[in-house]
Image (tube, rainbow, N blue to C red):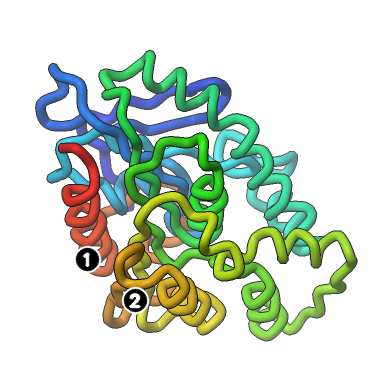
Amino acid sequence: MSVELSGAIEGVAAGVPFVALPPSEHERTAPMVLTWHLLGAPFSEAAMAAALPMRDLPAWRVHLGLPLTGKRFPEGGFEGFFRLASEDNVLNVVEPLTKQVEAEFPAALAELRSLLSIEDGPIGLVGGSQGGAVALQMLTHAELPVAAAALVNPVTQLAPVIAANERVYDVTYHWSDRSRAVADEYDYVRRAEELTAPVLLVIGEKDDVSITEPAEALHKALGERRSELVTIPGMAHEFAEAPGIEPAPQTAHAKLVDAELTRWFARHLAV
């Protein structure tokens, strides 16, 4: 079932597709929260906007489309994407997707500021699953002004997730020196001291240990002053209707996540 995103602005900023939800008083400038979706439901910027609209937050909520997904799917669409992932998830998907976000983000951010009535101050970042790993990577960029971040079932350490895929899908991932280096780079428990802003970690009680245990380890590494950990009872990894491409009615679990994100950014953004 699809829903309409009331008041949403859809567009492209420096090549990056986005869905922006304006604050209720969008006649004046307001802070901005940027999100990156999952590689599962919600699997698009529009689906993420429907799942986590944060409508009570007096800020722009701008949901970005990840590379290799949605309007930027590789040849073959869904099937082409999953073929790349099955051949080598680390080197065909995770690394190029993350590197492309890092490359395109400064220009996209600048264009969004020119298109929308956004304040010049620090921004908020949100990411789910692999989108959470992208948000974590952006938090290692000290030049990026981030007030706070919120991560939902994030890929905090890549190696345990690859091991979980091996277990779930009964496959073997053949590690190389290069893919091990990528996994080491995207180990944010190891790199906790590089993260530049307070972090809210929201995890599902029913999610796999490859997600929950690294998130708990990151919370421990950051400490209570720099992070908060919230567990959503009964929630698994995904929190929108599958397949998660079109905007769908907010699930009960997404509503709980949405409330936690709204609370967090109301505290940390100048709203």
Residue 22 at what x, y percent from top left?
Answer: 22, 29
Q: Do the residues labelled 1 and 2 touch (CB within 8 Å)?
A: yes
Kind of residue sitting beneath label 1: Leu
From this viewpoint, which residue is outermost toward the left?
Answer: 25
User: Which residue is rendered at x = 72% and y = 65% of the image?
Assistant: 184
In the image, which disc is placed on residue 235? Answer: 2
Residue 126 lies left or right of residue 15; in this view the side is left
Q: In the structure shown, which secondary structural element does the residue marked by tag 2 occupy?
A: loop
Residue 28, above or below 43? above
> Dot 2, how many residues are within 10 Å of its Cα: few (below 14), some (14-19), or many (20+)?
some
Quarter residue 219 falls in: bottom left
Q: Is residue 109 above or below residue 263?
A: above
Q: Which amino acid does label 2 sit on?
A: Met
Q: State the image quarter where residue 178 is shown.
A: bottom right
What secondary structure is marked by label 1? helix
Query: Mark 1 — residue?
Result: 256
Image position of 132 (left or right of 90): left
Query: From this viewpoint, is residue 39 visible?
Result: no
Q: Which of 122 and 25 is in front in this view?
A: 122
What is the x, y in percent for residue 253? 27, 68
